[in-house]
Amino acid sequence: GAGVSQSPSNKVTEKGKDVELRCDPISGHTALYWYRQRLGQGLEFLIYFQGNSAPDKSGLPSDRFSAERTGESVSTLTIQRTQQEDSAVYLCALRVAGLSKGTDTQYFGPGTRLTVL
Amino acid sequence: QKEVEQNSGPLSVPEGAIASLNCTYSDRGSQSFFWYRQYSGKSPELIMSIYSNGDKEDGRFTAQLNKASQYVSLLIRDSQPSDSATYLCAGRRAAGNKLTFGGGTRVLVKP
């Protein structure tokens, strides 16, 4: 939805390996979010990019997690030295403006399912 | 205490009945609330947003917000088997901010 793709759709990796997840939005979306959803749970905020402003990294669970985005283009989420507790679906979301101020919403991409063995 | 709380369910309702889902939140700074529907193995899909106290209706869905009591609810009228999914409640402090999600309520609509 909302013109965003994520890759890979599934990733299986071994504990200790690094992984890179990609979010590819259509152009024109200045705000981009990453969330994580563990099995059977709600979504946890990870990081938020807004144009050229410094990203809000307050949700990143450890320094093994990092993310980058250049302008309004692709964002990558990197997890170093993966652990089994990193297994989750990683979702990218775009902000879509509403008809009036303050009514913007977020639409999610299809997600990447990460399994750490 | 989680910032956004939902009963995990499952909430089982017969086809054609009203499904009533509740969500409470602890952050009084939250201004806007959202209901997402999530089918198994799929990403969340926005179904309702509500920004002020009161009711908001959209088709078979009605969202209710009571900021004084810090609760949000979602009513699904004339429930259909296709409504069987997990419903996620999320709050947000201000436009553009991150969403804070509850754990979701699983709804089962039985024919």
Image: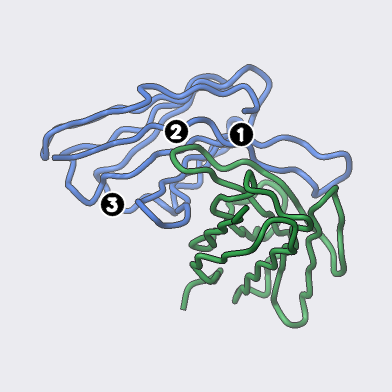
Identity, as a three-letter code, of the amino acid under mark 3: Ser
Instruction: Give the labeled residue for mark 1.
Output: A94
Report whether mark 1 lies on the same chain as mark 3. yes
**Residue A80: percent from left, percent from top:** 21, 37
**Residue A90: percent from left, percent from top:** 40, 39
Secondary structure under badge 3?
A: loop
In this image, A109 relative to A85: left or right? Answer: right
Report whether mark 2 lies on the same chain as mark 3. yes
Local packing at callout 2 (Cα closer than 10 Å; few below 14, some 14-19, many 20+) is many
Secondary structure under badge 1?
A: strand
Looking at the image, residue B26 lies above or below residue A69: below
Camera-nearest label, 2 or 3: 2
Q: Earlier in the sequence, mark 1 or mark 3?
A: 3
Among the chains, which one is blue? A
Q: Which tint was used for chain B?
A: green
Instruction: Give the labeled residue for mark 2.
Output: A111
Q: Earlier in the sequence, mark 2 or mark 3?
A: 3
Judged from this view, the residue extending furthest toward the front is B111
Identity, as a three-letter code, of the amino acid under mark 2: Gly
Residue B35's disc number: none
In this image, A77 relative to B100: left or right? Answer: left
Quarter of the image for residue A30 reads top right
Looking at the image, residue A90 lies above or below residue B111: above
Q: Answer whether labels 2 and 1 touch (C-beta < 8 Å).
A: no
Give the Cα separation between the discs numbered 1 and 3. 23 Å
Identity, as a three-letter code, of the amino acid under mark 1: Leu
Name the chain under label 1. A
Residue drawn at 27 percent across, 28 percent down: A11
Instruction: Give the labeled residue for mark 3.
Output: A62
